[in-house]
Amino acid sequence: MHAITIPEPGGPEALVWAEVPDPVPGEGEVLVEVVASAVNRADVLQRQGFYNPPPGSSPYPGLECAGRITALGPGVSGWSVGDEVCALLVGGGYAQRVAVPAGQLLPVPKGVDLATAAALPEVACTVWSNVFMIAHLRPGETLLVHGGASGIGTMAIQLGKAVGAKVVVTAGSPEKLARCAELGADVLIDYRTQDFVEELRKATDGAGADVILDIMGAKYLDRNVQALAVSGRLVVIGLQGGVKGELNLGALLAKRAAVMATTLRARPLQEKAAIVAAVREHVWPLVEGGTVRPVVDRTLPMPDAAEAHRVLESGAHVGKVLLLTP
């Protein structure tokens, strides 16, 4: 088969479409013929040499895919050859075939075409596990989403609204904020021209956000704590603004607030399976009912993954960038 390889870390040109050995499904795995994958920030970090895949996993980038099952490994039940699926991966999505633990498979939601389904697994699992399973967002609370026009952001807006939360977003242009509003965001903050702490206070009568989903890390840490409501929960899932920041424990104590940080890729199989099962139970009905939808910015041929990475790094996209397998 062919896959996107990374012979040497570097810029987008480091991504090389090359012939590689076919994967073989192991115990509890299925083999998926990939129709489409999607580009995630973690793929960019892996390409740059900063986020290597866990030992024993596929060396190729790609944390999600959609396609058809072509073979079942030993011990797999509940799935059949020919089933159309999408999947959460530890890697290997930028390829024509990938071996996937059966617990990380999801059926393609009714009403979503197979290729578009590749836009769902990573964002749905990330948002549901962090905003709902860890931070326990409840109806009537306020959710602040940084990077509202990103793949994660567009999903977080929709799921937040679906459960009855007030959703506040930051984004870097009026055009992106307009797209966030179309998805249901209640309060729109341009982080280039506005102070999100002050704007959030105005929008919540001084209360702040009950849950903050943050992709920036160190750069926003102090202001995020300022922006939290009493008993607020800050969940850090990205480090685009650095890894080391100063935490005001006094402010945290005064608010009885919590700071949490998570990644999805390195979690044990059982944890990933539990997250995928929760997404199937809680998110998939919303997708099939039309309340939540995948947001796709553009599709590109998988051999052109370098261009897809340039799009992601430019910040010019809204939602997901998909790669279609030739």
Image (tube, grey):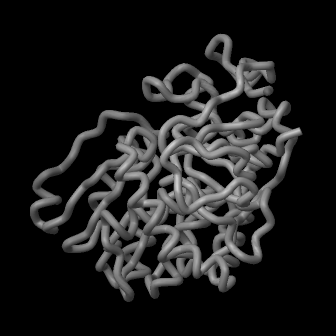
Residue at 70%, 42% (x, y): give it. 312
Q: Is residue 288 above or below residue 251?
A: below
Residue at 75%, 56% (x, y): give it. 82
Residue at 65%, 29% (x, y): give it. 23
**Residue 266 figure quarter:** top left
Residue 3, x across and y down, in percent: 75, 27
Q: Is residue 200 above or below residue 260?
A: below
Residue 71, x across and y down, in percent: 68, 44
Side of 165 where 185 appears, left or right: right
Q: Is residue 62 above or below residue 82?
A: above
Side of 289 where 268 appears, left or right: left
Side of 312 where 241 appears, left or right: left
Residue 299, x across and y down, in percent: 84, 50
Q: Nearer the viewer, residue 26 or 229?
A: 26
Whether residue 51 is visible = no
Residue at 73%, 60% (x, y): give it. 84
- Farthest residue in the top direction? 8
Disc tally is 0
Q: Nearer the viewer, residue 278 or 137?
A: 278
Residue 7, x across and y down, in percent: 67, 12
- Farthest residue in the front direction? 74
**Residue 307 figure quarter:** top right
Q: Nearer the viewer, residue 60 or 22?
A: 22
Whether residue 68 is visible = yes
Quadrant in which the C terminus is drawn: top right
Quadrant in which the N terminus is drawn: top right
